[in-house]
Amino acid sequence: MTHLSTAYKAGRRVEHSGEPGAALAKITEARGGFVWVDMVAPTAEEFAQVTGELGISALSYEELTRHRPRHAIEEVDGLLLISLKAFSRTGEETTNLATVSMHMCLTERVILTVHSAADALLAGVRRRLEARTKYLSCGPFAVLQTICDEVVAGYDRLAHEIEADIIELERDVFDDGTPHPGKEIAKIKHEVLFFRRVEDPLHSVLADLARGDVDVHRGTLDRFQHTLDRLDRVDNTIDGLNELITGIMQAHLAQVAVQQNSDMRRISSWAAIIAVPTMIAGLYGMNFDFMPETKWRVGYPLVVTVMAVACWVVYRKLKKTGWL
């Protein structure tokens, strides 16, 4: 079983054997504190074993980890259940965004986190909290708030990465030497919309926590509000990026339209030039008996010369008007 059980009393670690039940027994003996159990991709049996040791066996694995397409917060049988979605990039390209789900269960003395790929995020949370013993003494809600703050900080970093990608793309769009980046524009537009779709529902979760609609530790209310304000700034950034990429898309489409118009002018110009000899050749291709110059020795070179001169005149006229 992959899990990490940590007991805290007055913001400091309490030594124990490493099992969730032993950690809970330690804080019960110490008459204060809480236990944080972090589980990585547990099986249903492993989950049942841990929740049994923590005294929350009424919570099923399916109930906690069932698929939720959005951030969610709900109370079930006296337990506070929260689902958050963090972002991760699956590659170096700008459009390889994926979400990492994290599920949490809170009681007065226990916080249980379950995930499959959020180790780095929670390691950062643990370092931040253990450096602030006074805040950590606020209990499970201090852990929850710091996790929310770390998720929002990840949103903020990713928003600035996308902004840098868009600025670089903007240069490409207005650089005549760069091929038309239509596909790249569409991909980043999709990325921005996906970002907004994932990020936006977190507002309601943080608002419930910051307003005290959920019974949280009073010492964490201000910090939940700070995290909500930070999320609002990220939201404004994403709105700005969406408008920017929309403007770039419109500029690109305008460039494409101008290029297509220029191409159509060139095609029409060459069609007009070719129409002159085609008309003359068409007339002489009728093979009537009585046609001028058909029996004349210099008739053929004369007609070819007339064709060449006529084409040159049309070409010069079109060149002067800027069509060629």
Image (cartoon, helix red, strand yellow):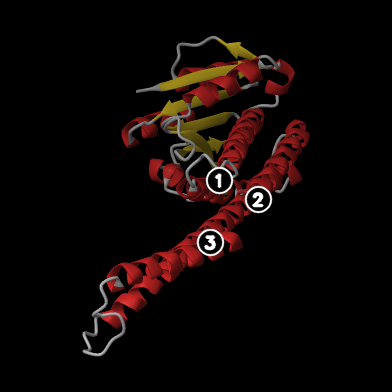
Q: CA distance from mark 1 to mark 3?
A: 55 Å
In terms of secondary structure, where does tag 1 sit?
helix
Q: From the viewer's perspective, is 118 left or right of 215?
A: left
Q: Would you call the spot at circle 1 few (<14 residues within 10 Å), some (14-19), or many (20 or more)?
A: many
Question: What residue is shown at x 31% (from left), y 67% (from top)?
Answer: 301
* Residue 282 located left or right of residue 41: left
Residue shown at 40%/40% (left/top)?
61
Q: Which label sits on residue 316?
A: 3
Residue positioned 55% across, 23% down in the render:
35
Note whether 16 is above or below 166 in the view shown.
above
What residue would you read off at disc 2? 204
Name the secondary structure under disc 3.
Answer: helix
Tag 3 or tag 1, which sits nearer the N-term?
1
Three-letter code, disc 2: Ser
Q: Position of residue 22 (x, y in %)?
A: 47, 17
The one nearer the camera, 185 or 209, is: 185
**What amino acid does circle 1 point to?**
Phe
Residue 252 location in percent, x, y?
56, 53
Instruction: Point out the frontmost of discs 3 and 2.
Output: 3
Distance of label 3 from label 2 (alpha carbons) = 68 Å
